[in-house]
Amino acid sequence: MTTHLGSCFCGAVTIEVTGAPEVMGYCHCRSCRSWSGGPVNAFSLWKPETVRVTSGAEHVASYQRTDFSQRQFCAKCGGHLSNRHPTVGLIDVFAATIPTLAFEPVLHVNYAETVLPMKDGLPKLKDFPEGFGGTGETMPE
């Protein structure tokens, strides 16, 4: 089974993911843009049992603005680690946090909020897939 290691910006917190993510893609929502500091956020969603903090757990802090997201970061450097989504039972480990993961996106979510149109041929969902509380409606590139 494949194992990937990653860390926060300063290296105080290390994280391990095993296996393969459930899905990878891009989120265009205002919350993810604000949190990531970029016009789009690359995500990789994992089952909780495949994600483990291997060191520095005492430095992991979190911020929860909505019931959907529990954003985790390093309290020492502020580096982003993950975003727990308890309502769908998955953890978004930021793609940039796992440098050895081959990022292979398959869709865009919350594309109705985009500030950076992307013409890459991937499905553009207006919000989320139906099973995740969205309409599942696609949008044109």
Image: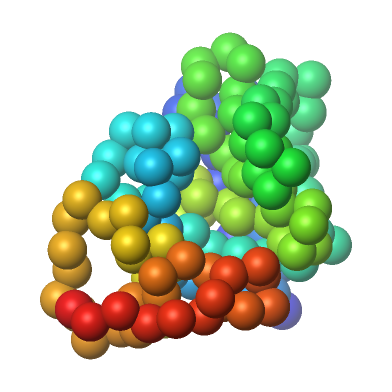
Q: Residue at x 66, y 70 (%)?
A: 132
Q: Quadrant of residue 30?
A: top left
Is the image coloured rainbow, by chain, by secondary structure, or in one colour?
rainbow
Q: In the rendered view, tell whether residue 48 sits above or below residue 134.
A: above
Q: Quadrant of residue 72?
A: top right
Q: Residue at x 47, y 66 (%)?
A: 127
Of 137 and 6, which appears nearest the observer?
A: 137
Residue 80 in the image, given as x and y percentages of width and height? 52, 34
Q: Does residue 16 show up?
A: yes
Q: Say which quadrant the C terminus sits in.
A: bottom left
- Name the side, left or right, on which 88 lies relative to 107: right
Number of numbered discs overlaid on the protein picture: 0
Q: Quadrant of residue 122?
A: bottom left
Residue furthest top in the image: 76
Q: Say which quadrant the N terminus sits in.
A: bottom right
Residue 92 in the image, given as x and y percentages of width and height? 60, 55
Q: In the rendered view, tell whether residue 57 sits above or below residue 25.
A: above
Q: Residue at x 64, y 30 (%)?
A: 65
Residue 84 in the image, given as x and y percentages of width and height? 70, 48
Q: Residue at x 67, y 37 (%)?
A: 66
- Name the side, left or right, on which 1 lies relative to 73: right
Of 38 and 19, which appears nearest the observer?
A: 38
- Name the side, left or right, on which 61 lies relative to 28: right
